[in-house]
């Protein structure tokens, strides 16, 4: 959550746009994502993986599967 909040602050975004529990097709591990909008206008530039497995410590671009959407590390 702290990585997402730091991103939000860096773009003058809202900390409330950071939320936990995002999954790719209901398959863990979960991630924290920065999102704006809703429904078909949902915008998600980045997610941060934090549980064990391939996603831990990775920044992802919000596409599924997570493993192929990794754009960098954060931890």
Image: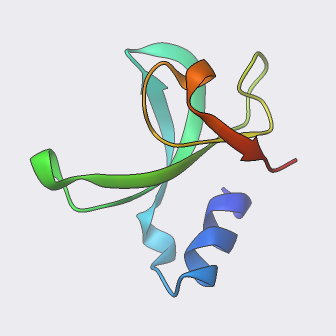
Quarter of the image where the N terminus is located: bottom right
The answer to whether residue 33 is left or right of residue 35 is: right
| Vertical side of 11 occupied by 70: above or below | above
Return the residue found at the far bottom. Answer: 12
- Which of the 4 quarters of the picture holds residue 7? bottom right
At x 77%, y 15%, the residue is 53
Q: How many marks?
A: 0
Q: Residue at x 37, y 15 (%)?
A: 25
For the residue pair 57 and 70, the one nearer the viewer reads as 70
The residue under the point 56% across, 31% down is: 69
Task: Please state if 55 lies on the left or on the right of 37 as rendered.
Answer: right
- Identify whether 8 is placed above or below 26: below
Residue 24's place in the image compared with 38, above or below, is: above
Using the image as rendered, state which of residue 34 and residue 72 is in the foreground: 72
User: How is the structure coloured here?
Assistant: rainbow
Residue 45 percent location from the top left of the image: 45, 55
Q: Is residue 20 above or below residue 45?
A: above
Looking at this view, name the residue that lies furthest to the right.
Answer: 75
State the image coordinates of residue 16 (x, y, percent, origin top left).
44, 70
Question: Residue 34, percent across and down?
Answer: 47, 57
The quadrant holding residue 43 is: bottom left
Direction left: furthest residue: 40
Q: Residue at x 50, y 35 (%)?
A: 21
């Amino acid at each position: 959550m702290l990585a997402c909040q730091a991103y939000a602050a860096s773009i003058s975004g809202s900390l409330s746009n950071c939320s936990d529990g995002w999954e790719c097709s209901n398959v863990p591990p979960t991630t924290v994502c920065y999102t704006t909008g809703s429904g078909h206008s949902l915008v998600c530039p980045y997610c941060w993986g934090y549980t064990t497995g391939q996603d831990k410590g990775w920044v992802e671009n919000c596409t599924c599967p997570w493993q192929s959407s990794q754009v960098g590390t954060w931890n």
